[in-house]
Amino acid sequence: RGQSGRRAFQAWASQLLAPRLAAIGWEVRAGESPLDAALRPKLIAALGFYGNRGVIDECTRRYDAFLKNPASLPGNLRSAVLTVVGRYATRETYDQLHALARAARTTEDKRRAYGAMQAVLDPQLARTTLELTLGNELSTTEASRNVAAVAAREHADLAWAFAKENTEALLKKT
């Protein structure tokens, strides 16, 4: 099964979820139900996770606009959009997300940006994210979550190897 099974599941998920996102749209509508408002970012995140090209492209477009004008991306979509962008990040995009995390003024904004970095598919960038755990950039609380977050997204084996290799340093950190 492996890769072909994963692709089949991704196609099925996209066929199931994309029509619902198309129906409720990306923008809040006057009088929309609270369910639609709550569902929108979840659909975006799921479709992005499952590789829906249209959602990935729209997230990238919105992210680029956000970098120029943060007010252009509504707060309720920020986590979903940044996570999708982070998942498919190139080194350049990853570095932009890292700069956003370091410059963030609120814990919520920091968590969004670091969360996007933790979602990255590229194993080398995931290693870079794991290495942040050992430095002083992350608070103790955030550092303790970092390894688990990288593992939960895509890189369980990589995170496990990192944890085993750095057990003493991780225990001292926490």
Image (cartoon, rainbow, N blue to C red):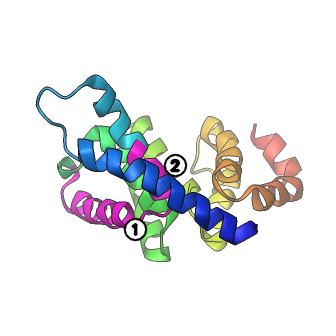
Secondary structure, mark 1, is helix
Residue under numbered circle 1: 53
Q: Provide the major secondary structure of the magenta segment.
A: helix
The answer to whether the residues at label 2 and label 1 have Cβ atoms under 8 Å apart is no
119 in relation to 77, above or below: below
| Residue closest to the eye, 39 or 149 | 39
Left or right of 170 on screen, residue 106: left
* Residue 1 drawn at (x, y percent): 76, 67
Disc on res. 20 = none
Residue 65 in magenta? yes
Please, what is the three-letter code of the amino acid marked with disc 2? Gly
Residue under numbered circle 2: 115
| Residue closest to the eye, 85 or 66 | 85
Residue 45 in magenta? yes
Q: Nearer the viewer, mark 2 or mark 1?
A: 1
Q: Which of the 4 image quadrants contains residue 37? A: top left
**Lower sequence index among marks 2 and 1:** 1
Which residue lies most toward the left here? 30
Please, what is the three-letter code of the amino acid marked with disc 1? Arg
- The stretch in magenta equals 43-70
Secondary structure, mark 2, is helix
Left or right of 102 on screen, residue 146: right
Q: Quadrant of the C terminus?
A: top right
**Marks 2/1: CA–CA distance:** 21 Å
**At 68% across and 58% down in the image, what residue appears?**
130
